[in-house]
Image (tube, helix red, strand yellow):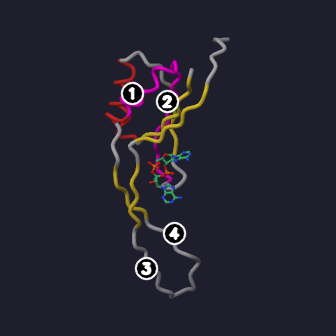
Amino acid sequence: MKLMIVVIQRQDENVLTKALVSQHIGITRVSSRGGFLREGNVTLFIVVPDHHVDDVMQTIRKHCYTRTKFVAPLPPVAESGEFYPSTPIEVQVGGATVFVVNAEVLGRA
Ligand code: 2BA
């Protein structure tokens, strides 16, 4: 069995979770937040047999989109009156960040 930890953008959540549930894939969803953008995102925990990982990846690729975001860089500690040009930085987010680890299901207590 594999545990897939899938970080997605909120905009993709509904379509992706509906697609996975319709394929009888079990999901646990938690609200999360990226350390870099500090924006809300969603993390899904999905445990599947090894041979289902590719199917889940295909569904994730189909429903999760890459989006461009702009972040204002944090200004360095500036002297008062000092000009600091805050040009926003462009970052690409997603489609999804996926981690896959071995899992053992011990049963339900
Ligand atoms: P965030 O940490 O908010 O990152 C959002 C996007 O900002 C990232 O998109 C990446 O394009 C960029 N980014 C992140 N850290 C950066 C840095 N130190 N310098 C420059 N740009 C940086 P994604 O790679 O698609 O990641 C989307 C979200 O997935 C992340 O949101 C985070 O919540 C999660 N994630 C990504 N890599 C991870 C990792 N190695 N471990 C745990 N979570 C991760």
Q: Position of residue 88 (x, y in %)?
A: 40, 68
Image height of 37 relative to 7, above or below: below
Q: Which of 62 and 72 is in front in this view?
A: 62
The circle on residue 74 is: 4
N-term-proximal mark, 1 vs 2: 1
Which amino acid lies under the numbered mark 4 shown in the image of this protein? Leu
Q: Name the residue under label 1.
A: 17
Image height of 82 relative to 5, above or below: below
Quarter where residue 24 is shown: top left
Marks 4 and 3, how far apart in space? 11 Å
Which amino acid lies under the numbered mark 3 shown in the image of this protein? Pro
N-term-proximal mark, 4 vs 3: 4
Marks 3 and 1, how far apart in space? 41 Å
Residue interval drawn in magenta: 38-60
Q: How crowded is mark 1: few (under 14 residues within 10 Å), some or many (20 or more)?
A: many
Q: Mark 3 points at which residue?
A: 85
> Residue placed farthest to the bottom in the image?
81
Image height of 68 relative to 22, above or below: below
The answer to the question of whether label 3 and label 2 lie on touching residues, with beta carbons closer than 8 A, is: no
Quarter where residue 87 is shown: bottom left
Quarter where residue 107 is shown: top right
The answer to the question of whether label 3 and label 1 lie on touching residues, with beta carbons closer than 8 A, is: no
Marks 3 and 2, how far apart in space? 39 Å
Q: Is mark 1 within 8 Å of ligand 1?
A: no
Which amino acid lies under the numbered mark 2 shown in the image of this protein? Arg
N-term-proximal mark, 3 vs 2: 2
Q: Nearer the viewer, residue 90 or 1?
A: 1
The answer to the question of whether label 1 and label 2 lie on touching residues, with beta carbons closer than 8 A, is: yes
